[in-house]
Amino acid sequence: MYYNIFVDEYRIVWDETKNADNKQKHKIGFEVAQYVFADPLRVWRLDKSENNKSGETRWQTMGKVGKTFFVVYTEQDEGDLTEIRLLSAREAEKHERRSYNGYYQIDNKGWTKDT
């Protein structure tokens, strides 16, 4: 595992092998993707996709780090901190960017936003 930034009460971690695979597949590293958690306009939802075959609770989030990124992660409470383990990151697709930017209603798609 690789430990990097702390954002508020979060500690962001990832597996370096998974990070290298993600860079190869999606051309973005977790070193950049982790900053979506610093975006005050970030949105998130429970991952209900068919890709989640592990049975663990996974989350999806979108946030801006120059571009809008779509990140899949898990959370685990570690005392006073929540450990966020990054699983996948990619540039958000057009319809996802439109949702993030407010062009589409996000409420009925399960997205949550801090108010």
Image (cartoon, helix red, strand yellow):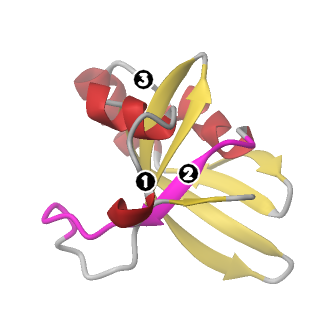
Dot 1 corresponds to which residue?
106
Mark 1 vs 2: CB contact within 8 A: yes
Amino acid type at image mark 3: Ile
Characterize the magenta stretch by its predominant secondary structure. Answer: loop
Q: How far across and how far down the image is residue 22, in percent?
A: 33, 33
Relative horizontal placement of residue 77, taking residue 92 as reference (left or right): right
Q: Nearer the viewer, residue 13 or 70?
A: 70
Q: How far across and how far down the image is residue 7, in percent?
A: 80, 50
Relative horizontal placement of residue 62, taking residue 99 as reference (left or right): right
Residue at 62% across, 45% down: 42
Neighbours of disc 1 within 10 Å: few (<14), some (14-19), many (20+): some
Closest to the camera, between mark 3 and mark 2, is 2
Among the two numbered marks 3 and 2 on one chain, the one whose residue lies closer to the N terminus? 3
Among the two numbered marks 1 and 3 on one chain, the one whose residue lies closer to the N terminus? 3
Residue at 75% across, 58% down: 115
The range drawn in magenta is 40-52
Amino acid type at image mark 2: Val
Q: Nearer the viewer, residue 19 or 88?
A: 88
Q: Secondary structure at mark 1?
A: loop
Q: Secondary structure at mark 2?
A: strand
Dot 2 corresponds to which residue?
43
Mark 3 to mark 2 CA distance (whole Å): 19 Å
Amino acid type at image mark 1: Ile
Mark 1 to mark 2 CA distance (whole Å): 9 Å
